[in-house]
Amino acid sequence: MTVHSPEGFRVAGMHCGFKPAEKKDIALLVSDYPCRAAGVFTTNRVKAAPVLYDQAILAQPDAEIRAVIANTGSANACTGDAGLADTRATAAQVAARIGCQPENVLTLSTGVIGLPLAMDAVTRGVAALADQVNTVGWQDAAAAIMTTDTRPKIASVRHESGFTITGIAKGAGMIAPNMATMLSMIATDADVPQSVLARELTAAVEVSFNRIVVDGDMSTNDTVLVLANGASGVTIADGSAQEAAFSAALTKVCTALAQAIVRDGEGATKFVTLDVTGAADDSAARAIARQIATSALVKTAFYGADPNWGRILCAAGYAGIDLDPARLALWLVADDKPAIHLVADGHPTDYDERAAIALMQKPEWAVRLDLGLGNGAARVWTCDLSHEYVTINGHYRT
């Protein structure tokens, strides 16, 4: 994939001591120009210090952002007043190095909850990163925000009208909708009014980061930030055709990053697209899709390539949405194989069990559940639940 660097942005990632063995663990994104910014954050009532800090800054109507600093190793969550003080001190260090005010710097943290920030490592990292940021450092920055991820996650779009959107993300476990457990920094050189930027980010997150499940847990630190510095000279006017183009490009970047998170889910061996159709409305379809995508029994059946369709119908039935069991229909779908019709009118069909198993053994496939009630539809991306997931999380700190 070609990574385009938006005009006026520089990035870098390096090792500063949060992780062992010289693994990259701190990243910095800097804009040469003041940015309008928007963010979407975790709905967990236990919020990390950087989430509270960023939310307060972005709540200011005249907020201008110049940089985002992100560390791994410590989530800086459940760290009280000391954690907030460390977040402010981190922002102040970045501001001093790049020549702006602390309120022009946003912060991100990920890692173990309850572990204080190692401020000596922060100081080393900020000092070095300020000199290392460059226009081609996206891969290093994406690597530096990884925790249990196995690979960096980057997405980039250069629109024919002249603006660019590039983003990085991290996430592999504690992934569930509203929002998924992840961090993402997205930069664009388009000139976007703040109200438009916030509206389009919220819309893009709803159909991307809010549609993925790895394990059903929600973090204290989930954050998606988008910064727009206008350096390309392309203006995204409210309600214009350019806004529609910007919306499509931003959604494309967010969707690519969200899907990359599921594909890299902790211990995952299968990437499954789950479509729910025929619901009374989209909200009902979304609720059922999320319930199925989160079910441990469904996900373990995915892992074992077991076409145990009863688990899927069971999960749909306890999603809290009215449905008629006699109208349910279910298919397995793969791009290179005919769809396998497992259930019709609430009863199993005379499907080929061996063919269904073979389809589910593929690394990517889809499930479609039709409720037979209306035009509502929703799509969610999920993965299987393997032995390796338990291994990773059983020894996360030890």
Image (cartoon, rainbow, N blue to C red):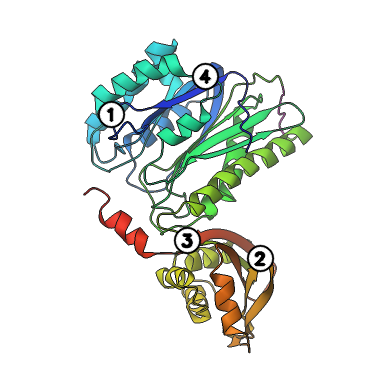
Q: Foreground: 176 or 202?
A: 176
Name which residue lies at 57% across and 42% down: 202
In-image side of 367 versus 125 (left or right): right
- Residue at mark 2: 376
- Residue at mark 4: 134
What separation in Å lies between label 1 and label 4 (alpha carbons)?
Answer: 22 Å
Q: Amino acid at mark 3?
A: Thr
Q: Residues within 10 Å of mark 1 (few under 14, many from 20)?
A: many
Find residue 101 and report its horizontal and vertical position in percent. Answer: 42, 14
Quarter of the rendering containing residue 282 = bottom right
Find residue 89 and report its horizontal and vertical position in percent. Answer: 30, 21
The secondary element bearing badge 1 is classed as loop
Q: Amino acid at mark 4?
A: Asn
Q: Foreground: 356 or 235?
A: 356
- Mark 4 or mark 2: name the one nearer the start of the chain: 4
Which-is-in-front pick, marks 4 and 2?
A: 4
Quarter holding the N terminus is top right
Which range is magenta?
234-238
Confirm whether residue 174 shows in the render.
Answer: yes
Per the image, is 236 magenta? yes
